[in-house]
């Protein structure tokens, strides 16, 4: 359904965006190891978009967005194939 797809997409985008804020990182800093907090911060859209916003084109930011696009296009192709077969 289109409504379910919208809600799931909005929730995923919200989680990817909020994961880089200070509120979330401070929550994990209290009990999680540093490598986990850094991994959570690296999944944030804000972390990768800030450099692009300043005009700095970094390969890891382009790789991050490109790999997300490829991942979701691949997942979409799998879902379409499953729907066609069923």
Image (tube, rainbow, N blue to C red):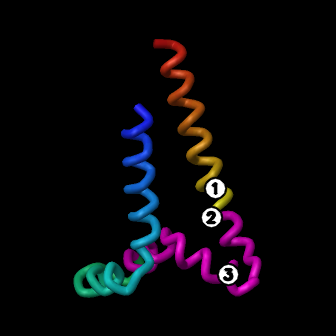
| Image quadrant where residue 21 sits | bottom left
Do the CB atoms of the residues marked 1 and 2 lie less than 8 Å apart? yes
The circle on residue 64 is 2
Q: CA distance from mark 3 to mark 2?
A: 15 Å
Q: Residue at x 68, y 64 (%)?
A: 63
Judge the density around disc 1: few (<14), some (14-19), many (≥20) Cα neighbours within 10 Å: few
17 above or below 82?
Answer: below
Q: Position of residue 71 (x, y in %)?
A: 58, 47
Find numbered disc 2 in the image and state the secondary structure of the residue it sits on: helix
Q: CA distance from mark 1 to mark 2?
A: 5 Å
Q: Position of residue 75 (x, y in %)?
A: 54, 38
Judge by depth and name the residue closer to the eye, 61 or 12: 12
Do the CB atoms of the residues marked 3 and 1 lie less than 8 Å apart? no
Q: Does 47 lie within the magenta span?
A: yes
The circle on residue 53 is 3
Magenta segment's dominant SS is helix
Q: Which residue is mark 1?
A: 67
């Amino acid at each position: 359904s289109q409504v379910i797809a919208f809600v799931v997409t909005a929730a995923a985008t919200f989680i990817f965006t909020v994961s880089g804020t200070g509120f979330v990182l401070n929550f994990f800093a209290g009990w999680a190891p540093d490598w986990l907090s850094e991994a959570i911060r690296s999944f944030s859209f804000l972390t990768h978009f800030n450099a692009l916003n300043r005009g700095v084109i970094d390969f890891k930011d382009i790789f991050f967005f490109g790999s997300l696009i490829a991942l979701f296009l691949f997942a979409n192709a799998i879902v379409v194939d499953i729907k066609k077969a069923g």
